[in-house]
Amino acid sequence: MEIRQSTDVLLVIDLQNDFCPGGALAVDRGDQIVPLINRLGSQFEHVILTQDWHPKSHISFASAHPGHKPYTSVPSEYGPQTLWPDHCVQATTGAGFHPALDLPHAELIVRKGFRRTIDSYSAFVENDHATPTGLAGYLRERGLERLFLCGLAYDFCVRHSAVDGVALDFECLVLEDACRAVRLPGSVEAADKAFLEAGIQRLSASEFLAG
Ligand code: VGL
Ligand code: ZN
């Protein structure tokens, strides 16, 4: 597959310390995809990063709901909200990008989840399904049309970003081996199904790079 340099984007989701081994919400082997993502990045003219960026006491933190444990769910105004360990707190080391991530030409960093009462898995729309992040407007204004997604986590932020991107008329493809999953019960299967239903192609980044 040929990269269309003027209209394609590499969208790197949440490659942050807290999602890597040793971090607060560590994704198994989350750090291992960094070299592959760096190689991918060097092939794309347009690279955009997302950054999970929560205030203290964020609604998605189990610690903000006394008596509730991480990885359970609570009702919220916009439906069930999964609770997580405190993670990606604004301006902490955990919220920083993995130190080996080497994408100096990334042209935009989209921060999400910065409103205390709304979580945001998607790079496009927050979990209330109403609050836009601004990414769709940026892409349209810049004439960017097709997104290759990679990063963390496959079954949450990559999943919702790709599905919302397609709903907003962007073509989205997922570079599967350049992602890692949180793996809550059934979450990877649910992501696979969501990609299939939305017509989102999954492809191997290694094969993609090999041409
Ligand atoms: C994510 C859970 C909570 C992700 C972010 O990046 O997939 N998952 N916040
Ligand atoms: Zn988060």
Image (tube, helix red, strand yellow):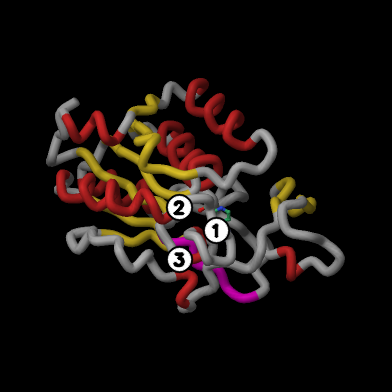
Q: Is residue 150 left or right of residue 69?
A: left
Q: Can residue 53 be found in the magenta stretch?
A: yes
As rendered, which of 209 and 14 lies closer to the eye? 209
Query: Ligand 2 is found in which quarter of the picture?
Result: bottom right
The majority secondary structure of the magenta stretch comes to loop
**Judging from the image, what secondary structure is the residue with disc 2 in?**
helix
Whether residue 125 is visible here, answered yes or no, is no
Mark 3 or mark 1: name the one nearer the start of the chain: 3
Q: Amino acid at mark 2?
A: Gly
Q: Can residue 101 be found in the magenta stretch?
A: no
Can you tell which quarter of the image residue 54 is in? bottom right
The answer for how far apart the CA atoms under marks 1 and 2 are is: 7 Å
Whether disc 3's CB lies below 8 Å from ligand 1 is answered no
Question: Which residue appears at 52% of the width and 50% of the height?
Answer: 28
Q: Which residue is mark 3?
A: 17
Crowd band around label 1 with a 10 angstrom C-alpha radius: few (<14), some (14–19), many (20+): many
Quadrant that contains the C terminus: top left
Q: Amino acid at mark 3?
A: Asn
Q: Which mark is residue 127?
A: none
Whether disc 2's CB lies below 8 Å from ligand 1 is answered no
x and y percentages locating residue 177 in the rendered image = 38, 37
Whether residue 173 is visible here, answered yes or no, is yes
**Judging from the image, what secondary structure is the residue with disc 1 in?**
loop
Q: Which mark is residue 30?
A: 2
Query: Where does the magenta region start and end?
Result: 51-56
Q: Which residue is mark 1?
A: 26
Q: Is residue 85 above or below residue 11?
A: below
Q: Amino acid at mark 1?
A: Ala
